[in-house]
Amino acid sequence: EKGGYDHFMLKEIHEQPKAISDTLTGRISEDGTKVVFDELNFPEGFAKDIDRIHILACGTSWHAGMVGKYAIEKLTRIPVDCEIASEYRYRDPIVSKNTLLIAITQSGETADTLAALRQAKEQGTRVLAITNVVGSSAAREADDVIFTWAGPEISVASTKAYTTQLTALYLFAGWLAQERGAAGAAEVPAMLTALRDMPAHAETVLETAPAIQAFAKDWSSREHAFFIGRGLDYEVSLEGSLKLKEISYMHAEAYPAGELKHGTLALIVEDIPVIALVTQDDLYEKTISNIQEVKARDAFVLALAWSGDTEIGKTVDQVIHIPKVSAFLAPILAVIPLQLLAYYASVARGNDVDNPRNLAKSVTVE
Ligand code: BG6
C-alpha cells in the first residue's frame, strides 16, 4: 500500500506531480488562456463586488493560505487577510456582504476551521471551501467548494495537500482576476502555461532527494535550525520549518530574512544550520546580504536557488537548485526539498515518520 516507499510521507511527496496535474485538470480552457471553475456558483455580480477576502485555516493549510493571499492580492488587488481559524473566530472580524471567506482544510473536518466557517455563514458571509475530501463537513457546509485532487493523504505531515492547495489558490486568483477584468488578468495566460509545466518541474525537483538526504543525515543531530527568506520565500519557510518540527522534533524557526537583525540574530551561532530560500528575483540582493549576516556568524547555510544561479555558491556552503519558473509560482517547487529535508531528518533520528508524537491527522476537537 506504500507503493514500494518506506513511508506514506515519502510516497505522498512523490505523488505531487500527479496531484498537481489532477488539480489542474478541467480547470484550464482548451486554448490555455482562461481558468474554468464550473463548480463555482457565485451570485450574479458577486465576483465583481467582493471587496475583502478572509482566508482561514490551520497548520499547513494556513501556510498555503499565506501564499494564496499573496496570489489573490497580486492578480486582483482585493485586500486579503489570512488568519489562523482558532484566532479568527474569537475576535470580531470586520465583514460585510461583499466579503468572501475562504476556508482551506485538507480533511474538511478540522474543528477550528469549521467553527470559523459556521460563524461566517451565520453572519451572512459567503464561504468558499478549498478541501481535499468530497463529502466532508467543509464541503457540505460551504456555499462553494473547490476540491484539491490530491487523493487520500495518509501521513500526518501534510505534503501533497499543500502543493495542491497552492495550485487551487493560484487558479482561483486567476479566475477572480479574469471575472473582474482586473489588470492582473493579463498575467493569467502565462501563469496557466507555467502551471501546466509544474508537474514536470516537480519531478525534476524530486531528483534533489539524495543531496537532501545526505544533508539531513549530517545535520540531524542538531537541535535547532533556521529557515530564512523574503516575500513568498518566507511563506514557504514557514511550511519548511513546521514540517521539520512536526516530524523530526528539531526546533526550527522561520524568519523573514530582513527581520533577523531586529530579533534573533543572537541565536545564529557557529555551525547552526540555516536554510535560505532564494527564489524571489526582486529580493535577490537583499536576501544575499541577509545570508552574509548569518555567514558572518559562521552559520552553515544551505541555499535553495534557481538552477542557473551560479552566483549563490560564492556566498553559501551548499546549494540545492530547482528549475527556474516565475518567482510568483516558486512556492510549489520550493517546498518540495523542504518536505524531503524534514522526511530524511525524521528518518535519520529514528522517528515514526507517518505518526509523529502528539499530532493527529485531523483535529476534530477545538
Ligand atoms: C493538524 C494536522 O492537526 O491540522 C496538520 O496535524 C494540518 O497536518 C492541520 O495541516 C490542518 O488540517 P486540515 O485538514 O484542516 O487541512
Image (cartoon, helix red, strand yellow):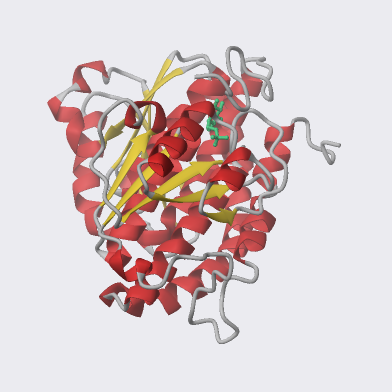
Q: In the rendered view, tell whether residue 35 sits above or below residue 128.
A: below
Left of 95 or right of it: where is 276?
right
* Residue 252 image offset from top left, x and y in percent: 40, 22
Relative to 221, does residue 157 appear above or below in the rendering? Answer: below
Residue name at image x 65 percent, y 41 percent: 136
Q: Is residue 289 left or right of residue 150?
A: left
Query: Number of callouts in the render?
Result: 0
User: x%, y% of residue 354?
Assistant: 69, 25
Q: Quadrant of residue 56?
A: top left
| Image quadrant containing the N terminus | top right
Residue in the picture at 65% in, 43% down = 13
Q: Is residue 77 above or below residue 69?
A: below
Q: Nearer the viewer, residue 237 or 140?
A: 140
Q: Residue at x 26, y 37 (%)?
A: 93
Q: Residue furthest bottom?
A: 31
Q: Is residue 20 above or below residue 346?
A: below
Ligand 1 is located in which of the four quadrants? top right
Residue 328 in view (yes/no): yes
78 on left or right of 101: left
Which of the pair 289/84 is nearer the observer?
84
| Residue 119 percent across, percent down from the top left | 40, 35
Could you tell whether 293 is left or right of 98 in the image? left
**View extreme (left): residue:** 262
Q: At which x and y percent is residue 163?
A: 54, 49
In terms of depth relative to the viewer, which is nearer, 130 or 187? 130
Say if residue 236 shows up in the picture. Answer: no
